[in-house]
């Protein structure tokens, strides 16, 4: 069989993530997933589900919800994982496993029902993101100021610091991400929605 032209992405089967030219993701999904990551909360990723085509959506996806559903044997109607949100709501992210590479592990590469989704950590969409403001940092700044400390002032100041952080994160979006595939690294363009 002749070698494939890497620029002819349509020549790859729908189970091969090398078909992807571009990912579309909402800015809120990336920021929300990254904030959850740095705060140590739920594990949120941006997920791309097969079958793969030239332009794909990366949707917010709660990994811990899927793990809980997997242990209970539950899935949402239509076979979607319980952690998936609808197209209007979400996407998924990566850990370097077969899920990230899109390899179903059966060696056939032609069964989209068994091809694992690609998981991308939100950090992949950012270049040198700022540090998350801690409650202690905002309390210290308030106590060091001329303004008398009150719990309500502290809460408001911390909310302003988090809002400023979220704005700064949006300024750090990258134009491309690299997917790890069985065929090697595959770089795709990223379009941000919203």
Image (cartoon, rainbow, N blue to C red):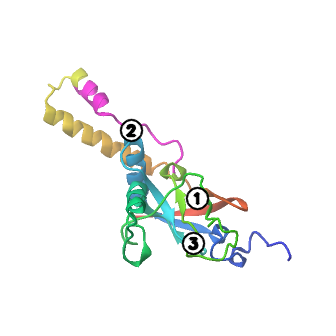
Q: Secondary structure at mark 3?
A: loop
Q: Which mark is residue 100?
A: 1
**Residue 20 placement (x, y as % from top left):** 62, 69
* Image height of 12 relative to 122, above or below: below
Q: Is residue 78 left or right of residue 140?
A: right
Q: Which mark is residue 114?
A: 3
Q: Which mark is residue 132?
A: 2
Q: Mark 1 Cα within 10 Å, few/some/many (few <14, many 20+)?
A: many
Q: Residue furthest right?
A: 2
Q: Which residue is rendered at x = 65% and y = 72% of the image?
A: 19
Mark 3 vs mark 1, foreground winner is 3
Mark 3 vs mark 2, foreground winner is 3
How many angstroms separate mark 1 from mark 2 (CA)? 27 Å
**Residue 5 placement (x, y as % from top left):** 79, 72
Q: Are marks 1 and 2 in contact (CB under 8 Å)?
A: no
Q: Are marks 3 and 2 in contact (CB under 8 Å)?
A: no
Mark 1 vs mark 2, foreground winner is 1
Q: Residue furthest front?
A: 72
Magenta residues span 126-142
Q: Is residue 135 left or right of residue 97?
A: left
The disc, 1 or 2, on the residue closer to the chain's N-terminal end is 1
The disc, 3 or 2, on the residue closer to the chain's N-terminal end is 3
Whether residue 189 appears in magenta in the rendering, the answer is no
Q: Secondary structure at mark 1?
A: helix
Q: Secondary structure at mark 2?
A: loop
* Image height of 194 relative to 111, above or below: above
Q: Which of the 4 quarters of the picture holds residue 15?
A: bottom right
**Residue 100 placement (x, y as % from top left):** 58, 58
């Amino acid at each position: 069989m002749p070698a494939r032209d890497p620029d002819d992405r349509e020549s790859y089967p729908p189970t091969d993530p090398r078909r992807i030219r571009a990912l579309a993701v909402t800015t809120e999904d990336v920021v929300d997933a990254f904030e959850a990551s740095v705060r140590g909360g739920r594990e949120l990723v941006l997920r791309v589900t097969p079958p793969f085509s030239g332009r794909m959506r990366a949707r917010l996806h709660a990994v811990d919800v899927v793990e809980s559903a997997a242990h209970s044997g539950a899935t949402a109607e239509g076979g979607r994982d319980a952690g998936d949100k609808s197209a209007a709501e979400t996407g998924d992210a990566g850990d370097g496993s077969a899920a990230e590479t899109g390899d179903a592990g059966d060696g056939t590469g032609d069964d989209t029902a068994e091809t694992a989704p690609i998981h991308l950590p939100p950090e992949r969409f950012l270049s040198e993101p700022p540090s998350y403001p801690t409650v202690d940092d905002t309390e210290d700044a308030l106590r060091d100021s001329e303004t008398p400390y009150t719990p309500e002032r502290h809460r408001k100041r911390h909310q302003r610091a988090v809002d400023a952080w979220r704005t700064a994160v949006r300024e750090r979006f990258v134009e491309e991400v690299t997917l790890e595939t069985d065929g090697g690294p595959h770089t795709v363009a990223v379009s941000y929605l919203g």
